[in-house]
Image: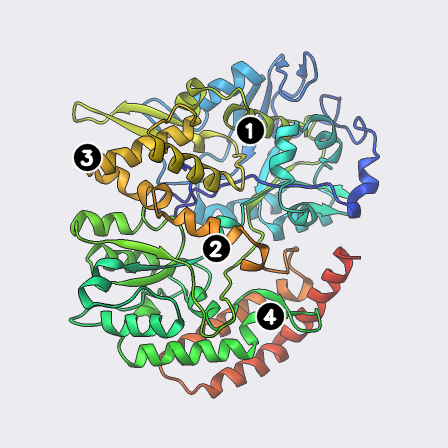
Amino acid sequence: MKTLTLRKTAASVLLASLILTAACSGNNSQSAGSNNSAGTSGTNSAANTDTAGTANEDGPISKYNPPITVSMIRPFDQTATFQPGESMEKNNWATALEQELGVIMKYPWGPIPGGQYEDKINIAIASNQLPDISQLAAPQLKQLVDAGSLEDLYPAYNKYATPLLKKIVEADGGRALKTATFDGKLMALTVPNGIGDAFGMLWVRKDWLDKLGLPEPKTMQDVQNIAQAFAKDGKIGLALDKDLIGNTFTLDGFANGYHAYPKKWIKDSNGKLVYGSIQPEMRTALQEAQKLYKDGAMDKEFGVKTADTVAQDFAAGKIGMTYGAMFFPLWPFADNKKNDPAADWRPYPIVSVDGKPAMPIADISSSGYFAAKKGFAHPEVIIKLANFYAEKFWSDHSTKEDYAKLREITVDDGKGGKKSVTVWFQAPFMVESGGKNQDNYIAINEALKTGDASKLNPEQTSNYNDIKKWLDNKDINGYGYNGVFGKGGSEGIILNYLQNENNYLINEFYGSATATMAARKSTLDKMELEVFTKIIMGAPIEDFDKFVQNWNKLGGEQITKEVNDWSASVNS
Protein backbone atom coordinates (compact mmCIF):
# COMPACT_ATOMS: atom_id res chain seq x y z
CA MET A 1 0.00 0.00 0.00
CA LYS A 2 3.06 2.22 0.04
CA THR A 3 2.11 2.94 -3.57
CA LEU A 4 -1.43 4.08 -3.00
CA THR A 5 -2.55 6.72 -5.44
CA LEU A 6 -2.22 9.59 -3.02
CA ARG A 7 -2.72 13.22 -3.94
CA LYS A 8 -0.02 14.24 -1.51
CA THR A 9 2.54 11.87 -3.00
CA ALA A 10 1.21 12.18 -6.55
CA ALA A 11 2.02 8.50 -6.85
CA SER A 12 -0.13 7.00 -9.54
CA VAL A 13 -0.05 3.23 -9.49
CA LEU A 14 1.12 2.52 -13.02
CA LEU A 15 0.81 -0.90 -14.63
CA ALA A 16 -2.12 -3.33 -14.60
CA SER A 17 -3.40 -4.56 -17.94
CA LEU A 18 -2.88 -5.20 -21.66
CA ILE A 19 -4.85 -8.09 -23.13
CA LEU A 20 -4.43 -9.60 -26.57
CA THR A 21 -7.99 -9.55 -27.83
CA ALA A 22 -9.76 -10.88 -30.88
CA ALA A 23 -9.63 -7.44 -32.42
CA CYS A 24 -5.85 -7.69 -32.39
CA SER A 25 -5.47 -11.43 -32.97
CA GLY A 26 -4.06 -10.93 -36.44
CA ASN A 27 -1.05 -9.23 -34.93
CA ASN A 28 -0.46 -12.15 -32.57
CA SER A 29 0.59 -14.30 -35.50
CA GLN A 30 3.52 -12.06 -36.35
CA SER A 31 7.02 -13.38 -36.02
CA ALA A 32 8.44 -12.23 -32.73
CA GLY A 33 11.61 -11.29 -34.52
CA SER A 34 9.88 -8.99 -36.97
CA ASN A 35 9.77 -5.22 -36.82
CA ASN A 36 13.26 -4.93 -35.35
CA SER A 37 12.25 -6.59 -32.07
CA ALA A 38 14.14 -7.66 -28.97
CA GLY A 39 17.85 -7.60 -29.12
CA THR A 40 18.10 -7.32 -32.91
CA SER A 41 19.98 -4.69 -34.81
CA GLY A 42 18.35 -1.44 -35.74
CA THR A 43 18.88 2.25 -36.34
CA ASN A 44 20.32 3.92 -33.29
CA SER A 45 18.16 6.53 -31.58
CA ALA A 46 19.75 9.95 -31.58
CA ALA A 47 19.27 10.17 -27.83
CA ASN A 48 20.70 6.71 -27.14
CA THR A 49 24.42 6.67 -26.39
CA ASP A 50 24.95 2.88 -26.32
CA THR A 51 22.52 0.33 -27.70
CA ALA A 52 24.98 -2.25 -28.94
CA GLY A 53 24.41 -4.72 -26.12
CA THR A 54 22.66 -8.05 -26.50
CA ALA A 55 21.19 -10.23 -23.79
CA ASN A 56 23.30 -13.30 -23.04
CA GLU A 57 20.34 -15.69 -23.10
CA ASP A 58 17.83 -13.31 -24.71
CA GLY A 59 15.25 -14.04 -22.01
CA PRO A 60 12.56 -11.93 -20.33
CA ILE A 61 14.93 -10.51 -17.70
CA SER A 62 18.32 -11.71 -18.92
CA LYS A 63 21.15 -9.23 -18.62
CA TYR A 64 22.44 -7.18 -21.56
CA ASN A 65 26.17 -7.70 -22.04
CA PRO A 66 27.66 -5.24 -22.62
CA PRO A 67 25.13 -2.95 -20.89
CA ILE A 68 22.89 -0.71 -22.96
CA THR A 69 22.19 2.93 -22.18
CA VAL A 70 18.56 4.01 -22.46
CA SER A 71 17.38 7.62 -22.36
CA MET A 72 13.94 8.47 -21.03
CA ILE A 73 11.67 11.40 -20.29
CA ARG A 74 9.04 11.12 -17.58
CA PRO A 75 7.35 13.30 -14.95
CA PHE A 76 8.82 13.37 -11.48
CA ASP A 77 6.92 13.68 -8.22
CA GLN A 78 8.36 16.72 -6.47
CA THR A 79 7.23 15.48 -3.05
CA ALA A 80 9.53 12.48 -3.43
CA THR A 81 13.10 13.13 -2.37
CA PHE A 82 16.42 11.40 -2.87
CA GLN A 83 18.84 10.59 -0.09
CA PRO A 84 22.09 12.57 0.17
CA GLY A 85 24.34 11.83 -2.78
CA GLU A 86 21.53 10.36 -4.89
CA SER A 87 19.90 11.58 -8.09
CA MET A 88 17.61 10.24 -10.81
CA GLU A 89 20.61 8.45 -12.34
CA LYS A 90 22.34 7.44 -9.11
CA ASN A 91 20.16 5.50 -6.68
CA ASN A 92 19.18 1.97 -5.64
CA TRP A 93 17.10 1.37 -8.74
CA ALA A 94 19.79 2.65 -11.08
CA THR A 95 22.29 0.29 -9.46
CA ALA A 96 19.97 -2.72 -9.61
CA LEU A 97 19.06 -2.15 -13.25
CA GLU A 98 22.68 -1.83 -14.30
CA GLN A 99 23.97 -4.76 -12.26
CA GLU A 100 21.12 -7.19 -12.80
CA LEU A 101 19.60 -6.21 -16.16
CA GLY A 102 22.49 -4.46 -17.88
CA VAL A 103 20.46 -1.30 -18.43
CA ILE A 104 21.85 2.15 -17.67
CA MET A 105 19.01 4.68 -17.46
CA LYS A 106 19.67 8.29 -18.44
CA TYR A 107 17.28 11.21 -17.96
CA PRO A 108 18.71 14.04 -20.09
CA TRP A 109 15.83 16.37 -19.16
CA GLY A 110 16.38 15.74 -15.45
CA PRO A 111 13.55 15.58 -12.88
CA ILE A 112 10.56 17.30 -14.49
CA PRO A 113 7.79 18.34 -12.06
CA GLY A 114 4.46 16.80 -12.98
CA GLY A 115 2.86 20.18 -13.59
CA GLN A 116 5.49 21.07 -16.20
CA TYR A 117 5.67 17.70 -17.91
CA GLU A 118 3.08 18.22 -20.62
CA ASP A 119 4.85 21.34 -21.86
CA LYS A 120 8.24 19.62 -21.78
CA ILE A 121 7.14 16.53 -23.70
CA ASN A 122 5.31 18.68 -26.26
CA ILE A 123 8.53 20.63 -26.84
CA ALA A 124 10.45 17.37 -27.25
CA ILE A 125 7.90 16.17 -29.81
CA ALA A 126 7.85 19.46 -31.74
CA SER A 127 11.66 19.65 -31.88
CA ASN A 128 12.05 15.98 -32.81
CA GLN A 129 14.16 15.42 -29.71
CA LEU A 130 12.44 12.39 -28.26
CA PRO A 131 14.58 10.10 -26.12
CA ASP A 132 14.54 6.34 -26.51
CA ILE A 133 11.52 5.92 -24.20
CA SER A 134 8.84 8.49 -23.43
CA GLN A 135 5.91 8.57 -21.04
CA LEU A 136 2.98 9.93 -23.01
CA ALA A 137 -0.61 10.97 -22.53
CA ALA A 138 -3.24 9.68 -24.96
CA PRO A 139 -3.25 12.76 -27.26
CA GLN A 140 0.55 12.69 -27.53
CA LEU A 141 0.51 8.97 -28.26
CA LYS A 142 -2.00 9.51 -31.08
CA GLN A 143 0.06 12.39 -32.47
CA LEU A 144 3.24 10.30 -32.59
CA VAL A 145 1.45 7.28 -34.03
CA ASP A 146 0.01 9.40 -36.82
CA ALA A 147 3.50 10.74 -37.52
CA GLY A 148 4.99 7.23 -37.68
CA SER A 149 7.39 8.09 -34.86
CA LEU A 150 7.03 5.01 -32.62
CA GLU A 151 8.02 1.34 -32.63
CA ASP A 152 5.46 -1.47 -32.56
CA LEU A 153 5.83 -3.28 -29.23
CA TYR A 154 3.74 -6.34 -30.09
CA PRO A 155 6.73 -8.42 -31.25
CA ALA A 156 8.59 -7.63 -28.03
CA TYR A 157 5.52 -8.20 -25.88
CA ASN A 158 4.81 -11.56 -27.51
CA LYS A 159 8.40 -12.71 -27.12
CA TYR A 160 9.44 -11.31 -23.75
CA ALA A 161 6.46 -10.68 -21.47
CA THR A 162 6.52 -13.16 -18.59
CA PRO A 163 3.39 -15.02 -17.48
CA LEU A 164 3.35 -12.82 -14.38
CA LEU A 165 3.51 -9.62 -16.41
CA LYS A 166 0.78 -10.86 -18.72
CA LYS A 167 -1.41 -11.76 -15.75
CA ILE A 168 -1.03 -8.23 -14.42
CA VAL A 169 -1.39 -6.37 -17.69
CA GLU A 170 -4.18 -8.50 -19.10
CA ALA A 171 -6.44 -8.08 -16.10
CA ASP A 172 -8.98 -5.56 -17.39
CA GLY A 173 -10.64 -7.47 -20.21
CA GLY A 174 -8.80 -5.75 -23.03
CA ARG A 175 -9.91 -2.17 -22.58
CA ALA A 176 -6.47 -0.70 -21.91
CA LEU A 177 -4.84 -2.60 -24.74
CA LYS A 178 -7.30 -1.18 -27.22
CA THR A 179 -6.34 2.38 -26.28
CA ALA A 180 -2.69 1.67 -27.18
CA THR A 181 -3.36 -0.42 -30.27
CA PHE A 182 -3.52 1.18 -33.71
CA ASP A 183 -4.13 -0.85 -36.87
CA GLY A 184 -3.20 -4.03 -35.06
CA LYS A 185 0.06 -2.64 -33.66
CA LEU A 186 0.81 -2.07 -30.00
CA MET A 187 2.36 1.38 -29.97
CA ALA A 188 2.95 1.69 -26.22
CA LEU A 189 2.88 -0.30 -23.03
CA THR A 190 -0.09 1.23 -21.31
CA VAL A 191 -0.32 1.20 -17.56
CA PRO A 192 -3.93 1.18 -16.36
CA ASN A 193 -4.91 1.41 -12.74
CA GLY A 194 -7.19 -1.13 -11.11
CA ILE A 195 -10.79 0.03 -11.12
CA GLY A 196 -11.50 -0.80 -7.48
CA ASP A 197 -9.49 1.99 -5.93
CA ALA A 198 -11.09 4.48 -8.32
CA PHE A 199 -14.52 3.95 -6.77
CA GLY A 200 -15.76 6.72 -4.52
CA MET A 201 -17.33 6.36 -1.11
CA LEU A 202 -18.91 8.49 1.57
CA TRP A 203 -16.79 9.56 4.55
CA VAL A 204 -18.48 10.76 7.73
CA ARG A 205 -17.24 11.81 11.16
CA LYS A 206 -18.83 9.13 13.32
CA ASP A 207 -18.05 11.04 16.51
CA TRP A 208 -20.22 13.90 15.25
CA LEU A 209 -23.01 11.48 14.36
CA ASP A 210 -22.91 10.01 17.85
CA LYS A 211 -22.82 13.41 19.54
CA LEU A 212 -25.95 14.48 17.65
CA GLY A 213 -27.69 11.12 17.96
CA LEU A 214 -27.92 10.70 14.18
CA PRO A 215 -28.10 7.34 12.37
CA GLU A 216 -25.44 6.23 9.91
CA PRO A 217 -26.30 7.20 6.31
CA LYS A 218 -28.43 4.71 4.38
CA THR A 219 -30.32 7.02 2.01
CA MET A 220 -29.74 10.34 0.27
CA GLN A 221 -32.22 11.89 2.66
CA ASP A 222 -29.93 10.76 5.49
CA VAL A 223 -27.01 12.45 3.72
CA GLN A 224 -28.93 15.69 3.47
CA ASN A 225 -30.06 15.52 7.10
CA ILE A 226 -26.53 14.83 8.30
CA ALA A 227 -25.03 17.64 6.20
CA GLN A 228 -27.53 20.12 7.57
CA ALA A 229 -27.08 18.95 11.16
CA PHE A 230 -23.28 19.17 10.93
CA ALA A 231 -23.34 22.70 9.51
CA LYS A 232 -23.46 24.56 12.82
CA ASP A 233 -21.08 26.98 14.51
CA GLY A 234 -19.02 27.59 11.40
CA LYS A 235 -18.75 23.91 10.45
CA ILE A 236 -19.17 22.55 6.93
CA GLY A 237 -21.64 19.71 6.44
CA LEU A 238 -20.46 18.45 3.03
CA ALA A 239 -17.11 19.29 1.45
CA LEU A 240 -16.57 20.33 -2.16
CA ASP A 241 -13.62 21.87 -3.97
CA LYS A 242 -13.66 24.16 -6.99
CA ASP A 243 -13.08 21.38 -9.51
CA LEU A 244 -16.44 19.93 -8.47
CA ILE A 245 -16.28 16.71 -10.51
CA GLY A 246 -13.71 13.99 -10.93
CA ASN A 247 -10.93 15.34 -8.76
CA THR A 248 -10.68 15.18 -4.96
CA PHE A 249 -13.57 16.52 -2.84
CA THR A 250 -16.19 15.98 -5.47
CA LEU A 251 -19.87 15.98 -6.27
CA ASP A 252 -19.54 12.62 -8.03
CA GLY A 253 -20.73 10.35 -5.22
CA PHE A 254 -23.56 12.72 -4.36
CA ALA A 255 -24.67 12.68 -8.01
CA ASN A 256 -24.38 8.89 -8.15
CA GLY A 257 -26.92 8.77 -5.34
CA TYR A 258 -29.42 10.25 -7.81
CA HIS A 259 -28.22 7.84 -10.55
CA ALA A 260 -26.34 10.64 -12.32
CA TYR A 261 -22.85 10.12 -13.72
CA PRO A 262 -21.16 13.44 -14.56
CA LYS A 263 -18.36 13.39 -17.11
CA LYS A 264 -18.91 9.67 -17.80
CA TRP A 265 -20.30 7.83 -20.80
CA ILE A 266 -23.04 5.38 -19.94
CA LYS A 267 -25.48 3.23 -21.90
CA ASP A 268 -29.05 4.41 -22.33
CA SER A 269 -32.06 2.09 -22.54
CA ASN A 270 -31.29 1.44 -26.22
CA GLY A 271 -27.67 0.51 -25.62
CA LYS A 272 -26.32 3.75 -27.07
CA LEU A 273 -23.61 5.69 -25.28
CA VAL A 274 -24.73 8.99 -23.78
CA TYR A 275 -22.90 11.67 -21.81
CA GLY A 276 -23.86 11.53 -18.14
CA SER A 277 -23.58 15.26 -17.48
CA ILE A 278 -26.50 16.10 -19.76
CA GLN A 279 -28.97 13.48 -18.53
CA PRO A 280 -32.12 14.37 -16.52
CA GLU A 281 -30.69 12.68 -13.42
CA MET A 282 -27.88 15.24 -13.38
CA ARG A 283 -30.45 18.02 -13.29
CA THR A 284 -32.00 16.44 -10.20
CA ALA A 285 -28.62 16.04 -8.50
CA LEU A 286 -27.72 19.69 -9.08
CA GLN A 287 -31.08 20.83 -7.78
CA GLU A 288 -30.59 18.83 -4.57
CA ALA A 289 -27.05 20.15 -4.16
CA GLN A 290 -28.42 23.65 -4.58
CA LYS A 291 -30.77 23.06 -1.63
CA LEU A 292 -27.87 22.04 0.61
CA TYR A 293 -25.88 25.09 -0.43
CA LYS A 294 -28.85 27.38 0.22
CA ASP A 295 -29.34 25.80 3.65
CA GLY A 296 -25.72 26.50 4.55
CA ALA A 297 -24.59 22.88 4.57
CA MET A 298 -21.82 23.54 2.01
CA ASP A 299 -18.93 25.98 2.13
CA LYS A 300 -20.07 29.23 0.56
CA GLU A 301 -16.60 29.63 -0.94
CA PHE A 302 -16.17 26.13 -2.41
CA GLY A 303 -16.09 27.61 -5.92
CA VAL A 304 -12.68 29.18 -5.32
CA LYS A 305 -11.10 26.60 -3.03
CA THR A 306 -8.50 24.16 -4.29
CA ALA A 307 -8.30 20.66 -2.87
CA ASP A 308 -5.27 21.69 -0.81
CA THR A 309 -7.22 24.59 0.68
CA VAL A 310 -10.12 22.30 1.54
CA ALA A 311 -7.62 19.91 3.12
CA GLN A 312 -6.66 22.70 5.50
CA ASP A 313 -10.30 22.90 6.56
CA PHE A 314 -10.22 19.18 7.28
CA ALA A 315 -7.08 19.59 9.36
CA ALA A 316 -8.76 22.37 11.31
CA GLY A 317 -11.75 20.15 12.11
CA LYS A 318 -14.25 22.23 10.15
CA ILE A 319 -15.70 19.46 7.94
CA GLY A 320 -17.92 16.55 8.91
CA MET A 321 -18.65 14.71 5.66
CA THR A 322 -17.25 14.27 2.16
CA TYR A 323 -17.42 12.02 -0.84
CA GLY A 324 -14.03 10.84 -1.94
CA ALA A 325 -11.35 8.21 -2.27
CA MET A 326 -10.18 5.22 -0.28
CA PHE A 327 -6.86 6.89 0.60
CA PHE A 328 -8.40 9.76 2.57
CA PRO A 329 -7.31 8.37 6.00
CA LEU A 330 -3.71 9.07 4.93
CA TRP A 331 -4.62 12.51 3.64
CA PRO A 332 -6.38 14.68 4.74
CA PHE A 333 -7.84 12.80 7.73
CA ALA A 334 -4.48 12.08 9.38
CA ASP A 335 -3.91 15.82 9.76
CA ASN A 336 -7.35 16.17 11.33
CA LYS A 337 -6.56 13.31 13.71
CA LYS A 338 -3.29 14.93 14.77
CA ASN A 339 -5.13 18.08 15.76
CA ASP A 340 -8.23 16.39 17.21
CA PRO A 341 -7.70 12.89 18.64
CA ALA A 342 -11.48 12.48 18.95
CA ALA A 343 -11.98 12.70 15.16
CA ASP A 344 -13.43 9.39 14.02
CA TRP A 345 -13.75 9.15 10.24
CA ARG A 346 -15.70 6.17 8.91
CA PRO A 347 -16.23 5.03 5.31
CA TYR A 348 -19.66 4.10 3.92
CA PRO A 349 -20.81 2.92 0.50
CA ILE A 350 -22.58 5.58 -1.51
CA VAL A 351 -26.32 5.57 -0.89
CA SER A 352 -29.37 5.96 -3.10
CA VAL A 353 -32.35 8.31 -3.27
CA ASP A 354 -34.73 5.42 -3.93
CA GLY A 355 -34.96 1.64 -4.03
CA LYS A 356 -32.56 1.38 -6.96
CA PRO A 357 -29.01 0.80 -5.66
CA ALA A 358 -26.52 3.62 -6.04
CA MET A 359 -23.50 2.54 -8.05
CA PRO A 360 -20.06 4.10 -8.14
CA ILE A 361 -18.46 4.46 -11.54
CA ALA A 362 -14.82 4.27 -12.55
CA ASP A 363 -12.75 5.04 -15.60
CA ILE A 364 -10.46 2.57 -17.23
CA SER A 365 -7.64 4.92 -16.36
CA SER A 366 -3.91 4.90 -16.71
CA SER A 367 -1.04 7.08 -15.67
CA GLY A 368 0.40 7.10 -19.16
CA TYR A 369 1.74 5.20 -22.12
CA PHE A 370 5.36 4.07 -22.40
CA ALA A 371 6.52 4.20 -25.98
CA ALA A 372 9.76 3.57 -27.88
CA LYS A 373 11.03 6.04 -30.46
CA LYS A 374 11.07 4.81 -34.04
CA GLY A 375 14.48 3.42 -34.82
CA PHE A 376 15.41 2.65 -31.21
CA ALA A 377 17.37 -0.59 -31.37
CA HIS A 378 15.92 -2.05 -28.19
CA PRO A 379 12.18 -1.40 -27.91
CA GLU A 380 11.98 -4.70 -26.00
CA VAL A 381 13.67 -3.01 -23.03
CA ILE A 382 10.27 -1.55 -22.10
CA ILE A 383 8.91 -5.07 -21.65
CA LYS A 384 12.05 -6.19 -19.81
CA LEU A 385 11.88 -3.26 -17.40
CA ALA A 386 8.26 -4.16 -16.69
CA ASN A 387 9.20 -7.82 -16.17
CA PHE A 388 11.97 -6.81 -13.79
CA TYR A 389 9.67 -4.72 -11.61
CA ALA A 390 6.95 -7.36 -11.50
CA GLU A 391 9.37 -10.16 -10.66
CA LYS A 392 10.96 -8.15 -7.85
CA PHE A 393 7.70 -7.51 -6.03
CA TRP A 394 4.86 -9.74 -7.18
CA SER A 395 6.40 -13.12 -7.99
CA ASP A 396 6.54 -16.16 -5.71
CA HIS A 397 10.25 -15.56 -5.22
CA SER A 398 10.06 -11.87 -4.29
CA THR A 399 12.32 -11.24 -1.31
CA LYS A 400 12.26 -8.98 1.72
CA GLU A 401 15.77 -7.91 0.73
CA ASP A 402 14.55 -6.57 -2.62
CA TYR A 403 11.63 -4.85 -0.90
CA ALA A 404 13.98 -3.21 1.61
CA LYS A 405 16.26 -2.03 -1.19
CA LEU A 406 13.89 -1.12 -4.02
CA ARG A 407 10.54 -0.28 -2.49
CA GLU A 408 10.94 1.07 1.03
CA ILE A 409 14.25 1.78 2.72
CA THR A 410 15.03 2.58 6.34
CA VAL A 411 17.12 5.69 7.05
CA ASP A 412 18.07 7.87 9.98
CA ASP A 413 15.33 10.31 10.89
CA GLY A 414 17.75 12.98 12.12
CA LYS A 415 16.44 12.60 15.67
CA GLY A 416 18.38 9.54 16.70
CA GLY A 417 15.80 7.14 15.31
CA LYS A 418 14.83 5.52 12.04
CA LYS A 419 12.16 6.21 9.43
CA SER A 420 10.88 4.50 6.32
CA VAL A 421 11.27 6.17 2.93
CA THR A 422 9.62 4.89 -0.26
CA VAL A 423 11.95 4.54 -3.25
CA TRP A 424 9.75 2.85 -5.82
CA PHE A 425 9.51 6.20 -7.64
CA GLN A 426 13.14 5.71 -8.71
CA ALA A 427 12.03 2.97 -11.12
CA PRO A 428 11.49 4.07 -14.75
CA PHE A 429 7.88 2.97 -14.28
CA MET A 430 5.91 0.65 -12.04
CA VAL A 431 4.02 -2.57 -12.56
CA GLU A 432 1.30 -2.77 -9.95
CA SER A 433 -1.42 -5.39 -9.72
CA GLY A 434 -4.79 -3.67 -10.04
CA GLY A 435 -6.30 -5.74 -7.22
CA LYS A 436 -3.26 -5.60 -4.96
CA ASN A 437 -4.77 -3.33 -2.34
CA GLN A 438 -7.83 -5.53 -1.95
CA ASP A 439 -5.61 -8.61 -1.62
CA ASN A 440 -3.58 -6.77 1.00
CA TYR A 441 -6.72 -5.86 2.94
CA ILE A 442 -7.83 -9.50 3.13
CA ALA A 443 -4.40 -10.78 4.13
CA ILE A 444 -3.76 -8.06 6.71
CA ASN A 445 -7.14 -8.47 8.37
CA GLU A 446 -6.57 -12.19 8.66
CA ALA A 447 -3.20 -11.52 10.28
CA LEU A 448 -4.75 -9.00 12.67
CA LYS A 449 -7.40 -11.55 13.59
CA THR A 450 -5.01 -14.45 14.20
CA GLY A 451 -1.92 -12.54 15.29
CA ASP A 452 0.11 -14.49 12.73
CA ALA A 453 1.83 -12.21 10.21
CA SER A 454 4.25 -14.85 8.93
CA LYS A 455 2.35 -15.40 5.67
CA LEU A 456 2.31 -11.75 4.64
CA ASN A 457 4.42 -10.58 1.72
CA PRO A 458 6.90 -7.72 2.31
CA GLU A 459 4.47 -4.94 1.42
CA GLN A 460 1.69 -6.45 3.51
CA THR A 461 4.10 -6.87 6.40
CA SER A 462 5.04 -3.19 6.20
CA ASN A 463 1.38 -2.12 6.23
CA TYR A 464 0.62 -4.57 9.05
CA ASN A 465 3.45 -3.14 11.15
CA ASP A 466 2.19 0.40 10.56
CA ILE A 467 -1.31 -0.61 11.63
CA LYS A 468 0.03 -2.24 14.77
CA LYS A 469 1.86 0.97 15.62
CA TRP A 470 -1.50 2.71 15.66
CA LEU A 471 -3.46 0.00 17.42
CA ASP A 472 -0.84 -0.67 20.09
CA ASN A 473 0.77 2.72 20.60
CA LYS A 474 -1.51 5.27 18.89
CA ASP A 475 1.42 6.24 16.65
CA ILE A 476 -0.14 8.69 14.22
CA ASN A 477 2.11 7.36 11.43
CA GLY A 478 0.02 4.20 11.43
CA TYR A 479 -3.39 5.88 11.61
CA GLY A 480 -3.85 6.27 7.85
CA TYR A 481 -2.95 2.68 7.04
CA ASN A 482 -5.32 1.44 9.69
CA GLY A 483 -8.07 3.52 8.09
CA VAL A 484 -7.42 1.89 4.72
CA PHE A 485 -6.40 -1.68 5.56
CA GLY A 486 -7.45 -2.17 9.18
CA LYS A 487 -10.74 -3.57 10.42
CA GLY A 488 -13.54 -1.52 8.88
CA GLY A 489 -11.10 0.23 6.54
CA SER A 490 -11.90 1.75 3.19
CA GLU A 491 -10.65 -1.25 1.21
CA GLY A 492 -13.51 -3.22 2.76
CA ILE A 493 -15.94 -0.87 1.00
CA ILE A 494 -14.07 -1.45 -2.27
CA LEU A 495 -14.26 -5.22 -1.79
CA ASN A 496 -18.02 -5.02 -1.27
CA TYR A 497 -18.36 -3.07 -4.51
CA LEU A 498 -16.28 -5.61 -6.42
CA GLN A 499 -18.09 -8.71 -5.17
CA ASN A 500 -20.71 -8.31 -7.88
CA GLU A 501 -20.35 -6.56 -11.22
CA ASN A 502 -23.88 -5.26 -10.77
CA ASN A 503 -22.62 -3.14 -7.87
CA TYR A 504 -20.73 -0.68 -10.05
CA LEU A 505 -20.40 0.87 -13.49
CA ILE A 506 -17.47 1.44 -15.83
CA ASN A 507 -17.14 4.49 -18.03
CA GLU A 508 -18.12 3.04 -21.39
CA PHE A 509 -15.76 5.26 -23.38
CA TYR A 510 -12.09 4.46 -22.88
CA GLY A 511 -10.64 5.27 -26.27
CA SER A 512 -8.36 8.08 -27.36
CA ALA A 513 -9.94 11.49 -27.80
CA THR A 514 -12.11 11.71 -30.90
CA ALA A 515 -11.47 14.45 -33.45
CA THR A 516 -14.18 16.73 -32.07
CA MET A 517 -13.15 15.99 -28.48
CA ALA A 518 -9.64 17.17 -29.30
CA ALA A 519 -11.02 20.38 -30.77
CA ARG A 520 -13.92 21.18 -28.44
CA LYS A 521 -13.75 19.23 -25.19
CA SER A 522 -11.81 21.82 -23.19
CA THR A 523 -14.38 24.49 -24.09
CA LEU A 524 -17.28 22.19 -23.25
CA ASP A 525 -15.69 21.16 -19.95
CA LYS A 526 -15.17 24.78 -18.96
CA MET A 527 -18.80 25.59 -19.76
CA GLU A 528 -19.98 22.57 -17.76
CA LEU A 529 -18.01 23.53 -14.67
CA GLU A 530 -19.20 27.13 -14.79
CA VAL A 531 -22.86 26.23 -15.24
CA PHE A 532 -22.88 23.51 -12.59
CA THR A 533 -21.10 25.72 -10.05
CA LYS A 534 -23.53 28.59 -10.63
CA ILE A 535 -26.55 26.31 -10.34
CA ILE A 536 -25.36 24.94 -7.00
CA MET A 537 -24.83 28.52 -5.82
CA GLY A 538 -28.36 29.50 -6.74
CA ALA A 539 -28.73 30.05 -10.49
CA PRO A 540 -32.07 28.91 -11.96
CA ILE A 541 -32.22 25.19 -12.58
CA GLU A 542 -33.46 26.00 -16.08
CA ASP A 543 -29.85 26.97 -16.84
CA PHE A 544 -29.18 23.24 -16.95
CA ASP A 545 -31.59 22.87 -19.87
CA LYS A 546 -29.80 25.68 -21.72
CA PHE A 547 -26.49 24.01 -20.96
CA VAL A 548 -27.67 20.75 -22.54
CA GLN A 549 -28.75 22.58 -25.69
CA ASN A 550 -25.46 24.50 -25.90
CA TRP A 551 -23.38 21.41 -25.19
CA ASN A 552 -24.95 19.60 -28.12
CA LYS A 553 -24.76 22.60 -30.40
CA LEU A 554 -21.10 23.43 -29.64
CA GLY A 555 -19.79 19.99 -30.48
CA GLY A 556 -21.35 17.58 -28.01
CA GLU A 557 -23.76 16.11 -30.53
CA GLN A 558 -20.91 15.32 -32.91
CA ILE A 559 -18.80 13.93 -30.04
CA THR A 560 -21.68 11.62 -29.13
CA LYS A 561 -21.77 10.34 -32.71
CA GLU A 562 -18.01 9.78 -32.72
CA VAL A 563 -18.11 7.98 -29.36
CA ASN A 564 -20.82 5.63 -30.63
CA ASP A 565 -18.90 5.03 -33.85
CA TRP A 566 -15.87 4.12 -31.73
CA SER A 567 -18.01 1.81 -29.58
CA ALA A 568 -19.34 0.04 -32.65
CA SER A 569 -15.82 -0.44 -33.99
CA VAL A 570 -14.32 -1.94 -30.82
CA ASN A 571 -17.30 -4.21 -30.23
CA SER A 572 -17.62 -5.45 -33.79
Q: Which mark is residue 533?
A: none
User: Is the Cβ of the residue at disc 2 closer than 8 Å to that at disc 3?
Assistant: no
Q: Residue at x 20, y 58 (%)?
A: 317
At label 2, the amino acid type is Phe
Report x, y in % for residue 325.
Answer: 40, 54
Report x, y in % for residue 341.
Answer: 17, 49
Q: CA distance from mark 4 to mark 2?
A: 19 Å
Mark 4 vs mark 2: which is more N-terminal? Answer: 2
For discs 2 and 3, the disc positioned in front in the rendered view: 3
Category of crowding for the residue at label 1, using alpha-carbon neighbours closer than 10 angstroms: few (below 14), some (14–19), many (at least 20): many
Mark 3 vs mark 4: which is more N-terminal? Answer: 4
Mark 2 vs mark 3: which is more N-terminal? Answer: 2
Give the residue pinned by disc 3: 473
Q: CA distance from mark 1 to mark 2?
A: 25 Å
For discs 1 and 3, the disc positioned in front in the rendered view: 3
Q: Residue at x 48, y 67 (%)?
A: 256
Q: CA distance from mark 2 to mark 3?
A: 31 Å
User: Is the Cβ of the residue at disc 1 closer than 8 Å to that at disc 2?
Assistant: no
**Relative side of 472 to 18, left or right:** left
Mark 1 vs mark 2: which is more N-terminal? Answer: 2
Q: Is residue 312 above or below residue 152?
A: below
Give the residue pinned by disc 2: 199
Q: Which mark is residue 275?
A: 4
Category of crowding for the residue at label 2, using alpha-carbon neighbours closer than 10 angstroms: few (below 14), some (14–19), many (at least 20): many
**Quadrant in which residue 319 is drawn:** bottom left
**Quadrant in which residue 57 is drawn:** top right
Give the residue pinned by disc 1: 390
Q: Is residue 247 above or below residue 114?
A: below
User: Is the Cβ of the residue at disc 3 closer than 8 Å to that at disc 4?
Assistant: no
User: Is the Cβ of the residue at disc 4 closer than 8 Å to that at disc 2?
Assistant: no
At label 4, the amino acid type is Tyr
Mark 1 vs mark 3: which is more N-terminal? Answer: 1
